[in-house]
Structures are given as structure tokens and as C-alpha cells.
Amino acid sequence: MRRYVAFDLETTGLSPETDQMIEIGAVKIQDQKIIGKYNCIIRPEVPVSDFIIQLTGITRKMLQNGIPLRTGVEGFLAFSEGFPVLGHNLMFDYSFMKTAANALKKPFEKDGVDTLAAARKLLRGLENKKLETLCAHYHYVNESAHRAYDDALATAVVFEQMKKEFPQEEEVFAPRQLQYRVKKRRPITEKQERYLKELMKYHTIKDSVNVEQMSQSEASREIDRIISKYGVMRK
């Protein structure tokens, strides 16, 4: 694979159905040269935990100043059009992007290569196959790990180094069709919406959450989170 878009996402959690992207980072490669870059911070419509803030270094002010999800996703779809994709644990990022694209009624069907899968096959002697471990193996310093663009660039560097180390393994580095079935999204029920709004008002929670746009599962999780943190409403 000589031309591709390496991309990485930072998200609020692990589920493409209930969590959201907060950063998209991508680098377009042609014959080992960077020919394009894409990076944006998304203003989330679901809560972001302190853990994610600490892990990524993306501040709440940066999130408040981020662009809408639609704008970020549409920008990436245009940026990556016509190119296969590369990622580390690729299906994680692909599942989030495809779910978001599907919600916008936009197609996102790609061929791609996963550097995690390639490392598991070719670098079996390494202690683990984390991106940071592969970077250390190839003496590449990723100064901003857990930031989307920097991780996307690191993934591209690791991929090119693996190709040099294992030139005979062309099949491992060949893009394959990615398959992910987006789960049907069920919108929030009237009962959930009413209860969640009452719960937020009761506890004087002023979150920038768009309750009306939540799914049933997102609403259930947010209700559980609030009750766990603040308690139930007492009449």
C-alpha cells in the first residue's frame, strides 16, 4: 500500500453507539511522503470524563471551542475520499467514523490495513503491540501520544518502517475491505427525556448536552451517571 490516509480518533469512550469523537487526526501519504493533513477538535454532545481529559490533554475549553460533529466528519470524508485507510486497532476508529457517517446518511466504505494486526503477525517478539511500543521499537518519538493527529502520524511511520523491515510480506501490507455493521440507533423516549431533564434541573446540572438528540442507550447511561454521582430526586 503506497498511498493511504492514516487516521486516529480520540473519543469519549469505547462504544460507537453511545460515545462520540472529540478529535479527528489524519495524514495523507503518497510514496512515503505527506501530501495532506487533517485535524480538528469536535464539540461533543455527550459528557466527557475527567479521565479522558487527563489522558488526551484536550481541555474542556478546547472542546467548547470545537467544531460540530457533522462538520468534522464531513471534512474527513472529503479528505479521505478515494484512499484506503490505515490505523492502529483500525476497526475501533473505523466503527466510530462509519457510525457517525451513517447518522449523517453519508457512505463510508473503505479498504484498509491495521498496524496492530500486522505487528501481531510480524513482531511477535515484542512485549506488546501498543503503538507506543512499536514507536520505541523503531526509535520514533511520538511527543503527543493520545492526540489524534500525532498518533495518526506515528501509525504511518510505524507502517513504513514495518514495510522496510519485512519487504517480503506484501500480503500483510495489502489493504482489505473493512466490514462493520452499524447498529440501529433508537432515539430517546419521551419518558427518558422528561426524566433526564428533571434530574438535571433537580441537581442544577448545566451540561452542554443536547438531550433531544440522545439515543435511548445514551440517555440511560447519562441517567445512571447522574444518579451515581448526585443521587436520586427526593420529593
Image (cartoon, rainbow, N blue to C red):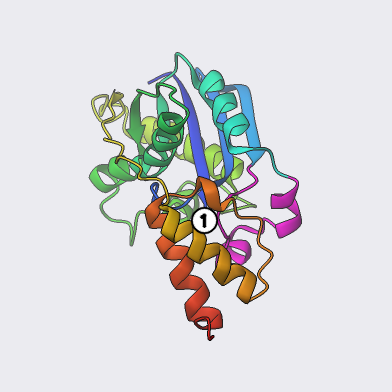
Q: Which residue type carries mark 1?
A: Thr
Q: Position of residue 166 (x, y in %)?
A: 31, 33
With respect to residue 181, does 134 lie above or below? below
Q: Position of residue 107 (x, y in %)?
A: 40, 21
Whether residue 19 can be seen here:
yes
Q: Residues within 10 Å of mark 1 (few under 14, many from 20)?
A: many
**In the foreground, 154 or 25:** 25
Instruction: Please give the name of the residue rendered at 57% of the width and 29% of the height, measured from the top-left corner.
Output: 27
Q: Which residue is mark 1?
A: 12
**In the foreground, 71 or 202:** 202
Instruction: Report the side of 179 relative to 100 (left or right).
Output: left
Q: Position of residue 99 (x, y in %)?
A: 40, 37
Write down the quadrant of residue 209 in the picture: bottom right
Q: Residue furthest front?
A: 235
Whether residue 139 can be seen here:
no
Instruction: Please give the name of the residue rendered at 28% of the width and 55% of the height, measured from the top-left corner.
Output: 125
With respect to residue 13, does 156 lie above or below? above
- The residue segment tinted magenta is 42-65
Instruction: Please give the name of the residue rendered at 42% of the width and 59% of the height, measured from the top-left corner.
Output: 191
Determine if the magenta segment contains residue 204: no
Q: Position of residue 185 (x, y in %)?
A: 35, 42
Instruction: Report the side of 108 relative to 150 (left or right).
Output: left
Image quadrant occupied by the C terminus = bottom right
* Figure disc tally: 1
